[in-house]
Image (tube, helix red, strand yellow):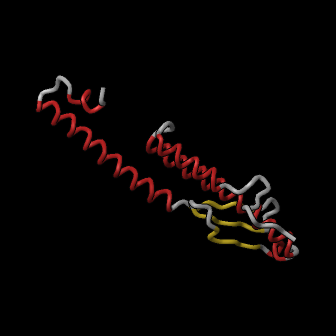
């Protein structure tokens, strides 16, 4: 049977109006929550620092690099080592930002919500590869 038929079956006009009003109210609350979650996720900034504190990177919720802060020790590294360290440290910050975004969504909608599952799959798809390098980048 059609789910809409089940919704209306055996209900008076007043009951149908009440059910519809409840569903509209739930949809409005979910839309408001989705807007709040989007704003909160867009505000996410995560930092990671290299093991010996040569540099700290900051990324946003999408993993985009926002800032790189170098110490004098970081400036003493060769170009190749410094580049590698920036990428490796950025990967850690990206992972933290993705985890935080997923936590925000799960807190708002619940762990089992399809929107949360979709967000997690998007984060996983954007995640850097195991070697820390996005596809198509190599060091020489």
Which x, y percent locates residue 99?
60, 49
Q: Residue furthest top?
A: 10
Q: Left or right: where does residue 80 sit relative to residue 65? A: right
The number of numbered discs placed on residues in the rendered structure image is 0
Which x, y percent locates residue 8?
20, 29
Which x, y percent locates residue 14?
11, 32
What residue appears at the point 15 percent right and 30 percent down from the top-left corner?
15
Q: Nearer the viewer, residue 43 or 15?
A: 15
What residue appears at the point 70 percent right and 60 percent down from the top-left corner?
48
Q: Nearer the viewer, residue 84 or 69?
A: 84
What residue appears at the point 80 percent right and 56 percent down from the top-left corner?
131
Q: Residue furthest left?
A: 13
**Location of residue 77 by image quarter:** bottom right
Q: Left or right: where does residue 77 sit relative to residue 24? A: right
Which x, y percent locates residue 86?
76, 67
Q: Nearer the viewer, residue 19 or 82?
A: 19
Q: Left or right: where does residue 51 sit relative to residue 7? A: right
- Position of residue 100 relative to residue 73, above or below, is above
Quadrant where the C terminus is found in the figure: bottom right
- Position of residue 103 relative to residue 89, above or below, is above
Quadrant where the N terminus is found in the figure: top left
- Position of residue 118 relative to residue 22, above or below, is below
Q: Nearer the viewer, residue 8 or 124?
A: 8
Q: Residue furthest front?
A: 1
What residue appears at the point 34 percent right and 52 percent down from the top-left corner?
32
């Amino acid at each position: 049977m059609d789910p809409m038929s089940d919704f209306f079956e055996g209900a008076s006009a007043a009951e149908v109006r009440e059910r519809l009003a409840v569903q509209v109210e739930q949809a409005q609350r979910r839309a408001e929550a989705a807007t709040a979650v989007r704003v909160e996720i867009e505000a996410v900034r995560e930092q990671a620092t290299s093991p010996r504190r040569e540099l700290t990177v900051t990324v946003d919720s999408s993993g985009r690099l926002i800032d790189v802060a170098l110490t004098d020790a970081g400036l003493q590294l060769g170009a190749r080592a410094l580049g590698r360290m920036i990428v490796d440290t950025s990967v850690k910050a990206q992972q933290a930002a993705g985890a935080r975004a997923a936590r925000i969504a799960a807190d708002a909608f619940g762990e089992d919500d399809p929107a949360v599952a979709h967000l997690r799959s998007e984060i996983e798809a954007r995640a850097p590869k195991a070697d820390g390098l996005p596809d198509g980048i190599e060091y020489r």
